[in-house]
Amino acid sequence: MCTLDKAVPVAATLSRFEPFQALDDKHREKIASLFKRRTVLKGQYVISESQSNDEVYFLVSGVVHACAFSLNGKQVQFESLTPGMMFGELSALDGKERSSNCIAATNLTLLVLPSPAFHQLIDDYKPVRDVVIARLAFLIRLHMRKLYELSTFPVSQRVRFEILRIASKVAGGYQLNADESENQQSVASDIMLSSVPTHQEIASRIGTHREAVTRELKSLESAGAITWRPGKYTIHDITQLTALVD
């Protein structure tokens, strides 16, 4: 069972989340009373497809896995949510059923916003509304892209696309152009990853099995593009990895 801490989060906590970063401290203090702080233990559900609720969640600490389950119980993972991310907004917006399960991969601290308050913020604050719209557009583009990859590319390519997405999160979406200088290439060449999805998690995201992911990651290691082992997850050359995708 989730536990609820009735302490009101401070404006400094809200400033970690993109929807509220354009607001000044005065406005963040004003809306802080709309939120509640909640802790969730590892393995517990934050959102279940079988439950009916329309709260919106803001992840302060921990990792959440957004996933679904097939009829035979196989978990299909959509996304790993990390601190600073918002989730659960779809049901808050349209009042429909939840589109996925969200399970605590670690102990969590959340800020929770009821649906009416979420609508109030969207109505009252244009910067909040703009970020929510941009996130919805991002989700549509992401899932259209994944559907395209699934129907068009072999597993080896889909693994590489997923590694590039992981790198993009760490590098802030940095993309290297072919005409950039050698010095700029060296800056972008080594991307260190503190935590990565497991082979099984990558497999469930791209519609394959763990063994196929393991084979492709070993192939990329042999090519010198990555180091992918416990304690050392590094993308050595993003340009090389991109070239392998091309």
Image (spheres, rainbow, N blue to C red):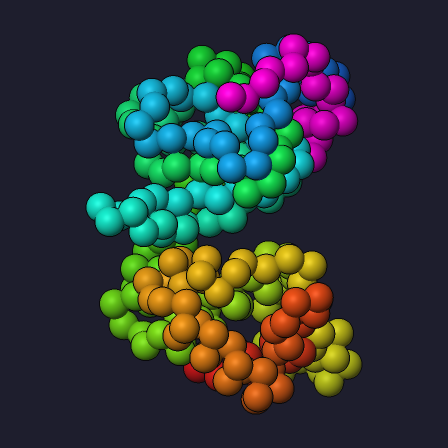
Q: Nearer the viewer, residue 71 or 133?
A: 71
- Percent coordinates x, y for residue 120 in the rendering: 49, 15
Q: Please name the residue shown 59% across and 18% down the image.
A: 3
Q: Which of 105 and 240 is in front in this view?
A: 105
Instruction: Name the side, left or right, on which 227 lies relative to 57.
Output: right
Give above or below for 241 relative to 232: below
- Percent coordinates x, y for residue 6 in the rendering: 65, 10
Instruction: Name the side, left or right, on which 246 lies relative to 164.
Output: left
26 magenta-colored? no
Instruction: Name the side, left or right, on which 215 lies relative to 196.
Output: left
- Where residue 184 sits, quadrant-wise, is bottom right
Number of marks drawn: 0
Q: Is residue 185 visible?
A: yes
Give above or below for 120 relative to 217: above
Q: Please name the residue shown 33% across and 62% down the image.
A: 207
Q: Please name the residue shown 41% across and 73% down the image.
A: 211
Q: Please name the residue shown 59% across and 60% down the image.
A: 196
Instruction: Name the side, left or right, on which 128 lies relative to 146.
Output: right
Q: Give the range drawn in magenta.
A: 1-24
Q: Quadrant of the C terminus?
A: bottom left
Q: Is residue 94 visible?
A: no
Give above or below for 215 relative to 128: below
Give above or below for 129 relative to 136: above
- Percent coordinates x, y for residue 29 in the rendering: 72, 15
* Outermost residue, left side: 71
- Percent coordinates x, y for residue 213 in the rendering: 44, 72
